[in-house]
Image (tube, rainbow, N blue to C red):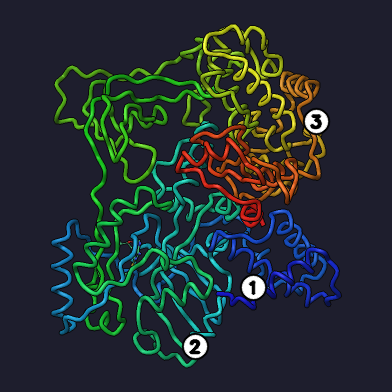
């Protein structure tokens, strides 16, 4: 997409623009800002390799927005500020695709692939056929039309001939370029096909957030992607974390209306390379060009194992004839092309028995039914417990206690109950009774009309306190080392913790007397608690467990306040004016800060020394390069101080450990490193880094 030189130029331009020290004309500045923002979007959303902090990116975006507000004539259709349009009040319009969106013929075993290969050899009259084999992404299909390098339309598949115009929603997906340099390749009008997906990680995170808010969980990533694409408000689409992968060119013309497919454009592989060059996310890294049916089989087999750890849900592989000429020779039926076939992986399913249903009370009081099943091995793990989401899910599936059930892991990490096998019922099954009182404190449960979840409203409910405290100390919240969920449960049982603020007045002398606690673990716990007083404000906001407020909203919110107590004075309207905060979230934040006991909690936390301020240094801690990675420094450091090392790790989202263990990812060694290095060498998973190598990682 961008040559080395272009990237260097854009990096340089970025620096100038961030410093605001150049003497551009207004239009020159707007153009430069657009260019660099588009470039950084590509690095972030397509390559996942950002070279700029979020802080600087936001500053550039703000400059462009302000400039465009002052000079509306400078706004261009493909300006990054134009991604999110207003909500639609009407239905989506129908639009005809430029080429029919056919589906793929399915196959389920390797013999089918051999059969397909035979058919293709017959249709093309040659044995010498190249195939491109790539993952079959499990999402919602989409067709994008670019004309004169601009995105002019996006549509759902619909009936294959006519789809729904979802252009404004597609624009809210940051990996879809608003303009793309097809003219460089002699293309004037082009229709692309691809899949809108949600990565496994984003799916799980968004789902957990929804369930915590009392909303219905999404069933799987495919439904989530297709549901999200058809939402009326592009603003909400932008929040869903969708991505688009483009894998087919169905129509391409030059300025004179000449068809370029199989004329100028030669192979599927080259098309994918070109799409990559034009800034799209594509299967380029995952695909393989194979020269025989055997190679195709082998490649499919490697993916059958790999797909469980692949970051995107795949339900199979697609085998495509590489040459576009040969594709034309094969032709299509009215349903599917004869030059491609989908190989579907067997869904990972197992049968088990529904033994009982437990009702768990979450930190917001939401009561979630959880199926306890006879433990069954499935795709590498033993499953004994599966969420049933809410009462409606149980009713829709018509589940009974004692039922034989089908459990599925279609690659999703979270297992799922497909349904009961009614034919295997013996008559001994029982109805599942959803409780009307809280299983923990016995208060009556309530369920607002529009919600799917029953909820316990008692703020002193012990189960909620437990969940709230577990959430408070968790990794995405206050990240308190040495204090996991079992510690919280134990402390609640012993009466050490009755509310969140008790975490900051733990009776360490008493804890030392407990079984399993030693000087060292108590001092680790104490250090973890002390450390948590110095967290950036967004962590405290997230830790409070305000309904509808997760990490993203907490970060948005923290940027707009000086201290957490500012939120006491914000109206619902004020809150709604913050980008990324909708009416429901605003109401929930407002309610939280109007509640005296919550303000009391925050005052107590502040008195204990917990940071409640938006500090300028936190704005820089935006990079997630080292997210999930653990570090330890040893020996005498020459390039930086210990404090700077700690800061660098934390600024980049990593974590420091205090000793060598299997949990350690990187040991950074200075001069004269001793026992820690010796110990680390015995653990093969630990990577030993020099100071320079570490600096390269964070540069
Ligand atoms: S090619 C004319 N490639 O699978 C052929 N499709 O069941 C165009 N899909 O409707 C499709 N990943 O939505 C192709 N790498 C991939 C795909 C893929 C997912 C979807 C697509 C299609 C469906 C067929």
Identify whether 399 is placed above or below 476: above
Report which quarter residue 69 is drawn in.
bottom right
Q: Nearer the viewer, residue 534 or 476?
A: 534
Q: State the residue at coordinates (73%, 49%).
A: 638
Figure quadrant of the C terminus: bottom right
Q: Dot 3, how many residues are within 10 Å of its Cα: few (below 14), some (14-19), or many (20+)?
A: some
Which residue is labeled 1 in the image?
7
Q: Position of residue 160 (x, y in %)?
A: 34, 67
Q: Position of residue 299 (x, y in %)?
A: 27, 62
Q: CA distance from mark 3 to mark 2?
A: 58 Å
Quadrant where ligand 1 appears? bottom left
Q: Are marks 3 and 2 in contact (CB under 8 Å)?
A: no
Which residue is labeled 2 in the image?
186
Figure quadrant of the N terminus: bottom right
Report which quarter residue 659 is drawn in.
top right
Report which quarter residue 74 is drawn in.
bottom right
Q: Position of residue 311 (x, y in %)?
A: 43, 51
Q: Dot 2, how many residues are within 10 Å of its Cα: few (below 14), some (14-19), or many (20+)?
A: some
Q: CA distance from mark 2 to mark 1?
A: 23 Å
- Comes first in the chain, label 2 or label 1: 1
Could you tell whether 589 is left or right of 320 in the image? right
Could you tell whether 528 is left or right of 144 in the image? right
Question: Helix, strand, or loop for circle 2?
Answer: loop
Could you tell whether 679 is left or right of 603 in the image? left
- Comes first in the chain, label 1 or label 3: 1
Which residue is at the far bottom? 256
Identify whether 166 is placed above or below 504: below
Which residue is labeled 3 in the image?
565
Q: State the residue at coordinates (68%, 60%).
A: 52
**Which numbered disc, 2 or 1, marks the residue closer to the eye?**
1
- Comes first in the chain, label 3 or label 2: 2
Identify whether 281 is placed above or below 558: below
């Amino acid at each position: 997409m961008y040559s080395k030189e272009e990237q260097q130029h854009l990096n340089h331009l970025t620096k100038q623009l961030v410093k605001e020290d150049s003497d551009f004309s207004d239009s020159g500045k707007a153009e430069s800002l657009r260019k660099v923002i588009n470039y950084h979007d590509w690095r972030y959303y397509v390559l996942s390799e950002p070279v700029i902090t979020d802080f600087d990116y936001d500053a550039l975006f703000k400059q462009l927005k302000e400039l465009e507000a002052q000079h509306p004539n400078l706004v261009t259709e493909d300006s990054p500020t134009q991604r999110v349009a207003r909500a639609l009040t009407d239905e989506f319009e129908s639009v005809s695709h430029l080429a029919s969106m056919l589906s793929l013929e399915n196959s389920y075993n390797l013999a089918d692939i051999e059969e397909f290969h035979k058919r293709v050899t017959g249709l093309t009259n040659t044995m010498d056929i190249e195939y491109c084999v790539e993952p079959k992404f499990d999402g919602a299909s989409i067709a994008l039309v670019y004309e004169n390098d601009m995105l002019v339309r996006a549509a759902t598949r619909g009936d294959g001939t006519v789809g729904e115009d979802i252009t404004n929603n597609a624009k809210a997906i940051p990996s879809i370029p608003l303009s793309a340099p097809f003219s460089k390749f002699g293309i004037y009008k082009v229709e692309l096909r691809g899949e809108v997906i949600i990565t496994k990680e984003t799916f799980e995170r968004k789902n957990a957030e929804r369930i915590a808010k009392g909303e219905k969980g999404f069933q799987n990533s495919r439904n989530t992607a297709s549901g999200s694409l058809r939402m009326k408000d592009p603003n909400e689409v932008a929040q869903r974390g969708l991505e688009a992968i483009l894998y087919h060119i169905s129509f391409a013309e030059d300025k004179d209306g000449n068809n370029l497919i199989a004329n100028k454009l030669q192979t599927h592989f080259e098309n994918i390379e070109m799409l990559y060059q034009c800034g799209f996310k594509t299967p380029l890294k995952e695909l393989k060009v194979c020269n025989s049916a055997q190679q195709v089989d082998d490649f499919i087999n490697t993916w059958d194992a790999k797909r469980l750890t692949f970051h995107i849900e795949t339900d199979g592989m697609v085998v495509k004839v590489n040459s576009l000429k040969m594709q034309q020779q094969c032709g299509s039926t009215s349903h599917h092309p004869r030059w491609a076939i989908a190989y579907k992986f067997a869904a990972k399913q197992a049968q088990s028995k529904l033994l009982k249903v437990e009702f768990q009370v979450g930190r917001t009081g939401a009561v979630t039914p959880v199926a306890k099943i006879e433990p069954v091995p499935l795709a590498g793990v033993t499953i004994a417990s599966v969420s049933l989401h809410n009462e409606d899910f149980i009713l829709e599936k018509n589940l009974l206690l004692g039922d034989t059930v089908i459990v599925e892991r279609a690659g999703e990490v979270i297992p799922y109950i497909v349904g009961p096998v009614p034919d295997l019922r013996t008559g001994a099954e029982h109805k599942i009774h959803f409780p009307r009182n809280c299983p923990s404190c016995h208060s009556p449960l309530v369920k607002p009309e529009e919600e799917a979840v029953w909820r316990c409203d008692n703020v002193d409910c012990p189960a909620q306190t437990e969940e709230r405290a577990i959430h408070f100390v968790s990794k995405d919240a206050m990240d308190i080392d040495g204090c996991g969920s079992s510690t919280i449960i134990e402390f609640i049982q012993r009466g050490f913790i009755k509310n969140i603020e008790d975490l900051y007045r733990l009776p360490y002398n008493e804890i030392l007397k407990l079984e399993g606690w030693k000087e060292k673990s108590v001092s680790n716990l104490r250090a973890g608690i002390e450390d948590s007083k110095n967290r950036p404000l967004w962590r405290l906001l997230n830790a409070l467990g305000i309904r509808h407020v997760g990490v993203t909203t907490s970060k948005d919110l923290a940027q707009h306040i000086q201290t957490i107590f500012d939120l006491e004075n914000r109206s619902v309207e004020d809150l709604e004016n913050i980008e990324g905060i909708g009416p429901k979230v605003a109401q929930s934040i407002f309610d939280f800060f109007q509640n005296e006991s919550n303000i009391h909690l925050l005052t107590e936390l502040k008195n204990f020394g917990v940071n409640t301020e938006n500090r300028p240094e936190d704005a820089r801690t935006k990079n997630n390069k080292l997210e999930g990675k653990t570090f330890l420094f040893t020996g005498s450091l020459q390039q930086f101080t210990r404090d700077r090392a700690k800061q660098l790790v934390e600024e980049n989202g990593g974590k420091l450990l205090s000793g060598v263990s299997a949990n350690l990812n990187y040991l950074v060694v200075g001069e004269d490193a001793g026992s820690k290095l010796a110990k680390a060498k015995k653990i093969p998973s630990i990577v030993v880094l020099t100071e320079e190598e570490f600096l390269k990682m964070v540069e």
